């Protein structure tokens, strides 16, 4: 019953079917909340025989229907032919999983049947499942049962108890069987992004509950049972003191029913509408209420957690359609902003977190995510988003509320982020611990940074895109500070932006290649790899126009532009691998930022070609859902009909979903003009697109709609809000 390819989610609770992990050799299928798997085994038998699945279909982000039928089976001395019984399983997530199973008799005679539901929970930490090393686990406790309920529970290494309560609407005969749940690896240990080696494997006995229901179904009639699975996550109550079990996950109001909803986008191109609608649904699904607040989780199944970099970039990509979500993201990350020096978690005063986790491995400090601050780009991205959000909403109260956090973030950039006092933000690659990462930019895999001769870059690293974020943090905030009346602060910020721009142009520009270096190493030598990273400088508005043009020309070359998008690494580099995570693959979010930057500099043809490539890629994937990444093979020959999928990627994934809305903003040229108190539009649509309609957008505190249509002499705008066509 968990061998489907569906993903369902309701706030923190999510259910995934047959999905591979990213290297441990295990399957991720199960029911999860707060980084713990509360159900990993679910099997349905009819008269002791397995069913044949006919279809699996999601009907909403939190509900799905699986349809199955019987194989050849028997009742007493009488055989039941295949396909005599239909079995409809309706999965629904709220604060728990509800499973409704309906049997329909198509045999032409009454049928005595036994329906058996087998359930098991291993309560594994999500990082454990992914293959992060672990020496031991806690104890699975004996199930507590009655004829209508089962309690599966686990005593963790932190002396806390987690449980899954299963209830049935009909009495059942309950049996407990022991199954061996082995996690011994079937493949050699492999290096993963941010991981030294996979877990050696721990073998344990897992109790499985078998609930059997008996009935006689009349001819052409149906019979239904309902099973509910309610997770009780460990939340700080010790079981050694005989305390009661923790409370269930509390239901919360659906995100789209709150002011945090998002505007809708519609075009005259059905395929584009499919991509945009999928993005809207997935971003609504991924918006998650955590104990600290609400923001978009980075992706299912690995990243349903508060994130810094990912959530901030998503908020920037979708600011024009969901500015209140951006404000909520800022508030959550501000609440968890670094306050002290803690090398074990890479925490420093004013720093914005990378990731926070609530599972057993975090509570026992086997991983540093409590929270973990191992990133240097989240902090300037936080300032960028603050500047954009307060300006878009024209929200002086939000500006005043979060200004102290922004000032602390800027102090981090200047004091802790600049490790050697040269005006650039660096990170140290040495000293990676456990689940910490070596490289602290968005390309955070262990092998993502090499010189042109293939040597890894080590020591203090200054990434080019991070300097772009720092520049934009200063430059964008300067305009916002001036708008809200603090001209002295604005002048100081402009000076800082000018200095950062000069440093980047001086130290990162490779004159002989007409491109920016990916990074500077410990000795301030250029890492002269041709990568997608400098494309983020365009989004930030840092390069001079002539250098932006040089980047645009370089991004048309086939070594970096695969035809399916801009590769993370040029095929001319010695470490290029189209099937790698960061050394030749294609990331939709990366491409959306590059396209937005190209449009801002007037290179609309190339930006629209990137948009077209991503749209074409979406046509080849299930549900038109852009994946986290795909392989960087060239779009030629037999591979020209669809991009090659990456072996393991999150689906849905937030910043991949958010790529489509950002591409719309780039086509429309949407910008807030604070001096005129309006939203301006300067469109350049691709030739295959003629109409774009946005409904429910919020502009400077006012909700409105706009429709842009191509006309013979240009474009025509219809709107009921403060929006002007340039």
Image: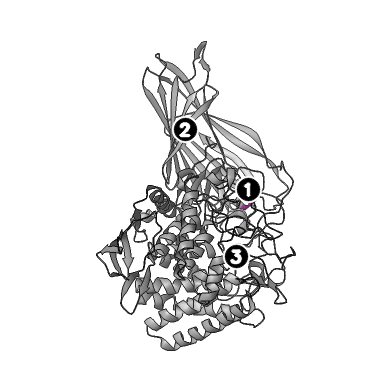
Q: Residue at x 48, y 84 (%)?
A: 494
Q: In the rendered view, would you say 500 is above or below 454?
A: below
Q: Is residue 18 magenta?
A: no
x, y percentage for residue 322?
38, 62
Q: Residue at x 51, y 70 (%)?
A: 538
- Whichever of labels 1 and 3 marks the residue nearer the N terminus, that label is 1
**Could you tell me if residue 293 is visible in this image?**
no
x, y percentage for residue 543?
53, 75
Point out the frontmost of discs 3 and 2: 2
Q: Secondary structure at mark 3?
A: loop
Point out the frontmost of discs 1 and 2: 2
Q: Give neighbour class at mark 1: few <14, some 14-19, many 20+ (Cα, 10 Å).
A: many
Q: Which residue is mark 1?
A: 129
On screen, residue 169 versus residue 182, left or right, reads left
Span shown in magenta: 127-131
**Could you tell me if residue 583 is visible in this image?**
yes
Which color scheme is applied? Answer: one colour
- Dot label at residue 372: 3
């Amino acid at each position: 019953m968990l061998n489907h390819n569906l993903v369902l989610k309701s706030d923190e609770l999510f259910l995934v079917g047959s999905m591979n992990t990213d290297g441990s050799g295990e399957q991720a299928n199960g029911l999860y909340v707060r980084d713990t798997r509360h159900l990993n085994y679910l099997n349905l038998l009819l008269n002791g025989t397995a069913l044949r699945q006919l279809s699996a279909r999601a009907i909403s982000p939190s509900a799905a229907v699986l349809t199955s039928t019987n194989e050849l089976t028997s009742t007493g001395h009488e055989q039941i032919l295949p396909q005599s019984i239909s079995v409809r399983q309706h999965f629904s997530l709220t604060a728990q999983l509800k499973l409704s199973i309906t049997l329909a008799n198509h045999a032409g005679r009454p049928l005595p049947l036994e329906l058996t539901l087998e359930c098991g929970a291993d309560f594994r930490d999500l990082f454990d499942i992914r293959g992060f090393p672990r020496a031991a686990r806690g104890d699975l406790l004996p199930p507590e049962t009655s004829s209508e309920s089962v309690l599966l529970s686990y005593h963790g290494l932190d002396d806390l108890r987690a449980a899954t309560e299963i209830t049935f609407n009909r009495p059942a005969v309950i049996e407990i069987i022991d199954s061996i749940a082995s996690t011994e690896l079937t493949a050699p240990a492999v290096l993963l992004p941010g991981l030294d080696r996979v877990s050696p494997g721990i073998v344990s006995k897992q109790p499985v509950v078998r609930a059997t229901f008996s009935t006689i179904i009349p001819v052409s009639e149906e019979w239904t049972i309902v099973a509910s699975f309610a997770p009780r996550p460990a939340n700080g109550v010790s079981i050694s003191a005989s305390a009661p079990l923790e409370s269930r996950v509390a239901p919360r109001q659906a995100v789209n029913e709150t002011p945090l909803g998002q505007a809708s986008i519609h075009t005259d191109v059905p395929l584009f509408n499919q991509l945009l609608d999928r993005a809207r649904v997935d971003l609504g699904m991924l918006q998650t209420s955590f104990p600290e607040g609400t923001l978009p989780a980075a992706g299912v199944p690995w990243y349903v957690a508060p994130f810094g970099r990912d959530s901030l970039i998503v908020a920037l990509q979708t600011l024009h359609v969901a500015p209140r979500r951006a404000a909520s993201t800022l508030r959550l990350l501000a609440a968890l902003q670094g306050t002290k020096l803690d090398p074990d978690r890479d925490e420093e005063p004013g720093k914005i977190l990378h990731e926070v986790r609530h599972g057993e491995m975090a509570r026992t400090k086997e991983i540093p995510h409590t929270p973990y601050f191992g990133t240097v780009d989240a902090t300037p991205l936080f300032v960028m988003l603050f500047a954009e959000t307060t300006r878009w909403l024209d929200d002086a109260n939000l500006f005043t509320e979060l200004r102290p956090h922004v000032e602390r973030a800027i102090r981090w950039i200047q004091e802790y982020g600049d490790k050697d006092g040269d005006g650039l933000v660096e990170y140290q690659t040495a000293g990676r611990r456990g689940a910490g990462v070596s490289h602290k930019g968005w390309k955070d895999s262990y092998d993502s940074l090499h010189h042109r001769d293939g040597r890894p870059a080590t020591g203090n690293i200054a990434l080019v895109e991070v300097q772009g974020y720092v520049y934009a943090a200063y430059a964008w905030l300067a305009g916002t500070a001036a708008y809200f009346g603090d001209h002295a602060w604005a002048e100081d910020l402009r000076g800082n932006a000018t200095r950062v721009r000069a440093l980047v142009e001086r130290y990162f520009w490779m004159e002989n290649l007409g491109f920016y270096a990916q990074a500077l190493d410990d000795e301030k030598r250029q890492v002269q790899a041709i990568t997608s990273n400098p494309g983020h400088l365009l989004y930030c508005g840092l390069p001079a126009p002539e250098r932006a043009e040089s980047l645009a020309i370089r991004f048309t070359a086939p070594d970096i532009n695969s035809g399916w998008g801009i590769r993370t690494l040029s095929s001319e580099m010695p470490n290029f691998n189209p099937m790698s995570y960061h050394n030749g693959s294609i990331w939709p979010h990366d491409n959306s930022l590059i396209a937005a930057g190209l449009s801002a500099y007037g290179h609309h043809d190339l930006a629209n070609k990137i948009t077209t490539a991503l749209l074409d890629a979406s046509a080849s994937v299930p549900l038109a859902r852009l994946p986290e990444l795909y392989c960087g093979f060239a779009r030629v020959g037999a591979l020209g009909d669809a991009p090659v999928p990456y072996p393991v990627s999150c689906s849905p994934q937030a910043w991949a979903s958010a790529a489509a809305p950002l591409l719309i903003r780039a086509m429309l040229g949407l910008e807030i003009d604070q001096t005129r108190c309006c939203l301006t539009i300067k469109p350049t649509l691709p030739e295959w697109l003629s109409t774009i309609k946005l409904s429910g957008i919020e502009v400077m505190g006012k909700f409105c709609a706009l429709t842009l249509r191509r006309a013979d002499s240009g474009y025509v705008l219809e709107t009921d809000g403060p929006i002007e066509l340039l």
